[in-house]
Image: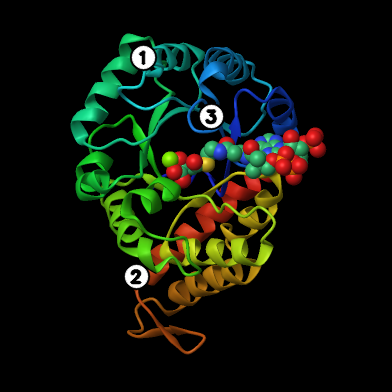
Amino acid sequence: MTDVTPLRSVLYMPSSNERALEKAKSIACDGLILDLEDAVAPDAKPAAREQAAAAASSGEYGRRTVTIRVNGIGTEWHDDDIVAAAQAGPAAVVVPKVNSAEEVHALVAALEKAGAPDHTRLWAMVETPEAIFNVREIAAASERLAVLVMGTNDLVKELYAEHVPGRAPLLTSLSLSLLAARAAGVQILDGVYNDVKDDEGFLAECTQGRQMGFDGKTLIHPGQVAPANEQFAPSPEAVEDARGLIQAWEDGRGSGVVTYKNKMVENLHVESARRTLAIHDAVQALEG
Ligand SMILES: CC(C)(COP(=O)(O)OP(=O)(O)OC[C@H]1O[C@@H](n2cnc3c(N)ncnc32)[C@H](O)[C@@H]1OP(=O)(O)O)[C@@H](O)C(=O)NCCC(=O)NCCSC(=O)C[C@H](O)C(=O)O
Ligand SMILES: [Mg+2]
């Protein structure tokens, strides 16, 4: 089974924004991405790097999975970002625009050379056409790689596509990346929703992401956290049904066909129900 560490809501924040870094200590998101890339202006990058490293090693973010997003491979900031992030020892280093398994190998080698502790994983962003064609190899390239993160803004830009309700232009890329994540047994996070005032559109996109199989969603604003937490956790009805289905299966063992609420139950349904309960328990433990 894929790791069930809850990552329902993973909030980006500019590492140059001290107020946001402070505020994040009280935001109920499952994870934080302290950004050094797109959200930080070139002049602000050295100071942001120091602030992100200090925040990630501070221990002040409680249960949240704290990660640092470095600048992309080949940029003038990348090497220094990797060293600073590795030494800060966050839960993960998030790397944008990872295009191949070879890049994953090089990133892992660089993190290890810089002294990254074992608990610091690699999260690879999938956000270019080349990455989509290589996503299966990327997802399976290293034990250190724990999560794929969709970069839907960059994907839309690279495809000359448009952001539309239902995301038809992105469905091929989203589905291929999901298949790759599941085949490799790593987690996968959906991309961001840019209109921070459009609650209805955001909710629809969370529902779509959950139905497709994403483990959670990346976010850009604190107001998106609560709906994402709700959408990506099993609902009370789903938990009740999972328990009922497992009970029906155990009661009916040896009697041939088992049904629950008039629907056929097979071992695969029981496995899905157990996964639902495992996620529910993990969320309860996190929130408890
Ligand atoms: C989108 C924003 C620029 C909106 O900012 P603002 O207008 O200041 O919002 P509010 O006034 O509603 O803010 C209310 C308070 O919440 C704090 N806040 C806002 N955003 C965050 C945040 N992300 N993390 C923590 N705290 C946040 C404000 O400081 C206010 O606090 P207070 O003053 O105490 O009341 C802004 O939300 C923002 O900058 N968001 C993050 C943008 C970002 O990180 N972008 C880069 C990643 S997205 C991406 O590109 C993904 C991928 O690469 C792709 O290609 O798709
Ligand atoms: Mg991007």
Element marked by disc 2: helix
Q: Position of residue 123 (x, y in %)?
A: 39, 34
User: In front: 239, or 248?
Assistant: 239
The C terminus - image quarter: top right
Image quarter where ligand 1 lies: top right
Residue position for label 1: 79
> Residue 277, relative to residue 123: is it above or below?
below
- Mark 2 is surrounded, within 10 Å at the Cα level, by few (under 14), some (14 to 19) or many (20 or more) other residues, namely few
In the figure, is residue 238 to the left or right of 108?
right
Indicate which disc, 3 or 1, sits on the residue closer to the N terminus: 3
Residue found at x 68% / y 62%: 199
Indicate which disc, 2 or 3, sits on the residue closer to the N terminus: 3
The amino acid on which the numbered mark 1 sits, given as a three-letter code, is Asp
In the figure, is residue 130 to the left or right of 169?
left
Task: Give how far apart the Cα atoms at labels 3 and 1 are.
Answer: 15 Å
Residue position for label 2: 267
User: In front: 189, or 260?
Assistant: 189
Task: Give how far apart the Cα atoms at labels 2 and 1 are.
Answer: 48 Å
